[in-house]
Amino acid sequence: MDTGLFVSFRERLLESCGKVILGKDDVIRRVGVCLLAPGHVLLEDLPGTGKTMLLRAFAKCIGGEFRRIQFTPDILPSDLTGIHFYNQKRGEFEFRKGPLFANVVLADEINRAVPRSQSALLEVMEERQISIDGQTYRLEEPYIVMATQNPIESYGTFPLPEAQLDRFFMKLSLGYMEPEQEKEILRRPDTKDIIETLSPIVTAEELADLRRQSRAVTVRDDVTDYIMSIITATRQEERLACGVSARGSIALYRAAQITAAMEGRDYVLPEDVKDNVIPVLAHRITVVSGSHLDAAGLLKGLLEELPVPVE
């Protein structure tokens, strides 16, 4: 495999998206990992931190068809997937595709939709297909759902169920910018105008090749055992209502492979695994009530307890 292709992809992505969101290279890099995995990303943060702007910039960087969906309590599943309507001129029913038929789907404030509408995303996120009225439509690659939600707003929101959270490859957070970076934001042109100047940095064919090559990254047996020790620890932890699923263990394995490739290596180090544990696993576990730790804090404690393989 050619690790230089992955390093080049990372650098071009950081340069392009970094024009829009300053000082958040780590989050941008992780969104790139989700794209190559391939997997979907949930961006949860306070209002006004640039969640939507980052994902818009990312969509411009990878090209393809982009659709943004503003989720509201009255949105219906058919508003997302599409409907069959009767064409009076032709005298027959025709299928009108919904906004989920795109390469990059931005689900803005996803937790404002009722569970019935949220469930319309389950098949599309896992199978890359949509089934309507007995017909199944395959979606074109690359395909990625990028969702946002605000953690502090509870009025008029519907928390995502565990089954849907498990379908997100990573859950990320931007946080506030440094004061100097925010001062630069105040002085520069409007962010929306900057996004319009961005151009694709990778083609669909190049993405497919990067995804294929990433699976060739070597993962030693002791590193694989280390991954499984983390997964098993979550399943045996009494402070957790449920541990990480098999989907989560696969996601951690793939994230470590792609992280290593983006660092210019064709082999995975234990540090690549540890670097991805919280963004890949924290949203997949449920802490029992009464615990003084959140999911991220509990995972950090488990990592400190587990032995790390050495060469």
Image: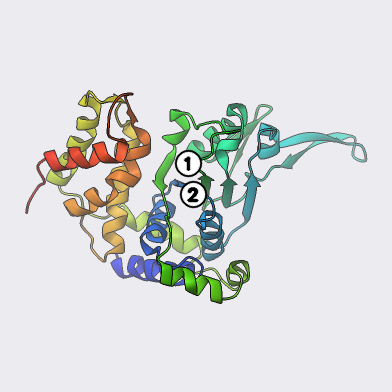
Nearer to us in this view, 117 or 66: 117
- Sort mark 1 into few (<14), some (14-19) or many (20+) by Cα contacts within 10 Å: few
- Residue occupying the point 27% across, 34% down: 293
Most foreground residue, 207 or 76: 76
Q: Taking the image as drawn, is residue 111 in sight?
A: yes
State the residue position of label 2. 46
Foreground of the two, 34 or 284? 284
Tell me the kind of residue under disc 1. Pro
User: Residue 97: horizontal and vertical position, in percent?
Assistant: 71, 43
Q: Is residue 205 above or below residue 287?
A: below
Task: Residue under label 1, please give it.
Answer: 151
- Distance between the alpha carbons at the discs numbered 1 and 2: 7 Å
Q: Secondary structure at mark 1?
A: loop
Provide residue 124's location: percent of width, then percent of height. 55, 38
Q: Quadrant of the N terminus?
A: bottom left
Residue located 57% across and 43% down the image: 109
Task: List the single residue furthest toward the right.
Answer: 89
Residue at image position (38%, 66%) is 10
The residue tagged with tag 2: helix, strand or loop? loop
* Cβ atoms under marks 1 and 2 closer than 8 Å: yes
